[in-house]
Image: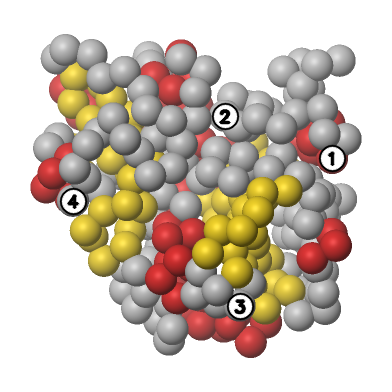
Amino acid sequence: MSITEAVTPNQVREMIRQNQWVKPTAGLANGYIQANLAVLPKDLAFEFLLFCQRNPKSCPIIDVTMPGSGVPALSAPDADIRTDIPKYRVYRNGVFTEELTDVTELWDESMVGFLIGCSFTFEEALLKNGIPIRHIEEERNVPMYKTNIPTVKAGRFEGPTVVSMRPMTEKDAIRAVQVTSRFPSVHGAPLHIGNPAAIGIEDINRPDFGDSVTVKPGEVPVFWACGVTPQAVAMHVKPEIMITHAPGHMFVTDLKNEQFSVL
């Protein structure tokens, strides 16, 4: 069985755990919530939780682990966030130092894991509404950019909002606003449509994270708040250690997308 044939989250996570998939997870286990990861020592956990509460479009909380535990008990009780993500990034004092496929050896009793909602959730709804997703078409990672939109500070945590971008026609953009507004727990409606410079993006073809994608004539870039924002915040706050997912390499939960939609 290939991972594209794996239909349950547990099957996908098992293949990731065996290093049989070390690529972005867009399109895997359709119908299930995927999540961004941020791991911090427990002495920073409350401030970070408050930061997420104050910035719900960028950092919608799906689950939080108990200190020292790698088990996300509410979203995937049979999983382990230390092994079940294709690629992790490690930041030390705000500097990206290494990329790993397993962070078990870095784990200690102080670690708290946060699973944060991901825009991959609403992509399924966009596709069902006939709105093409360019990075899926081109088999690339979604492009992500730091912006000049500040987050709301909480304790030591502050920094720029990161956005993900999907190009589409103006007609599709209007429909996309309607569709993604139904998913407030996973970023919701776009933050910005149109001119990238208005939110501090100098070159649409040079994302800060992920890959560039083709923007065709007649299309506009549509920007959503992104769960990579904590990585930008880590660079600003410089905690002694912070573990995240590599952009686009998400944790697949047992929760259904439909559980997070509103009518």
**Residue that numbered label 1 is attached to:** 17
Instruction: Looking at the image, tell me whether mark 2 or mark 3 is earlier in sequence order.
Output: 2
Q: Say which quadrant the C terminus sits in.
A: top left
**Residue that numbered label 3 is attached to:** 240
**Residue that numbered label 2 is attached to:** 26
Real-space Cα separation, disc 2 to disc 4, in angstroms: 26 Å
Instruction: Looking at the image, tell me whether mark 3 or mark 1 is earlier in sequence order.
Output: 1
Query: Are there few (<14), some (14-19), or many (20+) residues within 10 Å of tag 1?
Result: many
Instruction: Looking at the image, tell me whether mark 2 or mark 1 is earlier in sequence order.
Output: 1
Identify the amino acid type marked 1: Arg
Foreground residue, 51 or 30? 51
Identify the amino acid type marked 4: Gly
Instruction: Looking at the image, tell me whether mark 2 or mark 4 is earlier in sequence order.
Output: 2
Position of 103 with respect to 120 (left or right) is right
Q: Single out the mark in the foreground, 2 or 4.
A: 4
Identify the amino acid type marked 2: Ala
